[in-house]
Every structure is written in structure tokens, then in C-alpha cells.
Amino acid sequence: MDFRKTFDTIPEQFEKWRLRYCDELFTEIIEIAKLDLNKSILEIGPGTGQATEPFLKTGCNYLGIELGEHFTEFMKRKFNPYSNFHIVNDDFETHDFGEQKFDLIFSATTIQWVPEEIGFSRTYDLLKQGGTLAMFMTLSDEKSANEELYDKIDQIYKKHFQVETKYTCKLNYDNVVNYGFVDYSYLEWKKVRVLNADEYISWISTHIEHITLQEPFKSRFYNGIREAIMEVGNKITINDTIALYIAKKP
């Protein structure tokens, strides 16, 4: 199964429940890339634009490349007021960018879907000299603050979470230095969320494998999750790490 367009089937839920990033992350990237009206940037797979607007507000020339048709139309409606907003519905791996070069290329999670040898080499080629590559995502820890509940949820996964294909995308961001990038660094910020059962289910329902979950497993799985959280006071605490990997083209 090609998971890459699975998220595109739920644009409204994706927009409502996927996590936003912190202001500190955007400030860091914007300062490192020295974004202004004269700079050009490329976002790989913006989805519904959870990470897009802070960059648009700098006035830079923004281009998003999005594989999903529904996501693309969603983005057009959402960011239509910005004259510096442009988006193309195509595959980053094969799209012909012509002579375009960028001062910043960034990805909020999406680059992990691109094979390393394509993702890192294409971004390197598409960047101007001195350009910046920024890759970021949120890593969620559901175990540390909920040991007993986590064990119950784990058992529910083992019993009812039956999907045809497992998500196996893994990208070693450290390997970016093997493709010519320099000044590679890692930064992170911490956040805490407290969700009730319905909020937690709505959030995990936007995870890649969960979207593909079929009946009768789907109802059994989510009913089990809801009951487990209700039993501990209808609350689950999640510790989030917002992770940023950033590098330069010399």
C-alpha cells in the first residue's frame, strides 16, 4: 500500500486535530534562513498548512508542492488572501522545478515519506548556495505520564488493531551530512497536552495506520480506548517534543 495519499482522504479532520508547532521553532528557522521579501521558499507536502502561515507572513515567495488533490484545494482556500502564496499539486520526487532555486526548503514531517537518496539529494540541488534545509515534527510520548493507562491501551492495540499494511517509513535525519550539507544541528522544544477520551480518539484517528483501520476492528478498537481512558478519570496526559533538524548548503 502506498500510504502517501492516505491523509488526503480526511482534510477537515487533519486540519482540526493535527498538532501545531511552537512559535520558537518558526522564529529559529526564519532567523537562520534570514527570510524576507526577497527570499524564495519551498514547502514539501504542506497538508492543510499547519506550518505554512508563519513563513507566508515574512513576505517571502512561497511555493508548496502537495501530492494530495484535496489538500491542495484546501490550501488554496485557506491561504488565498496571501499574494505570495503558490502551490502545485504534484509529486516532489518527480516534479520538474525547471530553473527554480530556493533559499529555504522545509518539511513538517513529510520528507520522511521520501527515500533518503531522493529527498536529500533533491533538496540539495534545489537550494541556492547558502540555502537552508529545515525538517521538523512532533514526537509524542504517551507513556511517561500514564504508565498504567498506557499498558491498557497497549493491550487494546494488540487485541483489536488489525491493519493490512504497517507503516514502516523511517528516515535517519543525521544522514543529511552525507549529501553535502553542513552546519547540521538539532533543536527541540517541550509541550504538554491533556486530552479527554473523545479528543484523544479524534487525534489518533488522523494517524496513518488508524485511517486505514476497517470494521469490525475499528469499533472494537476505539470503544476499548474510550473505556480505558474513562476508567482513569477521562484524562490522558501527553508529553510532546517538537524536534527540528536543520542544515545548510555550503
Image (cartoon, rainbow, N blue to C red):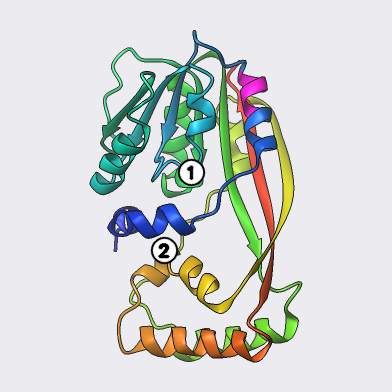
Residue 113 is covered by the magenta coloring: no
Q: Which residues are magenta?
A: 29-33
Residue 93 in view (yes/no): no
Residue at 60 percent of width and 43 percent of height: 173
Residue 208 bears which disc, if any?
2
Which of the 4 image quadrants contains residue 72? top left
Q: Position of residue 56 (x, y in %)?
A: 47, 25
Q: State left or right for residue 148 relative to residue 135.
A: right
Location of residue 199 with respect to 35 vertically, above or below: below
Q: State left or right for residue 85 relative to residue 37.
A: left
Q: Are marks 1 and 2 in contact (CB under 8 Å)?
A: no
Q: Nearer the viewer, residue 144 or 77?
A: 77
Q: State left or right for residue 191 relative to residue 29.
A: right
Quadrant where the N terminus is found in the figure = bottom left
Q: Earlier in the sequence, mark 1 or mark 2?
A: 1
Which of the 4 image quadrants contains residue 22? top right
**How much space separates mark 1 and mark 2, taking CA atoms?**
17 Å
Assess disc 2: are there few (<14), some (14-19) or many (≥20) residues with their C-alpha within 10 Å of its C-alpha. some
Q: Amino acid at mark 2?
A: Ile
Give the residue number, with chain letter if any, for mark 1. Answer: 50
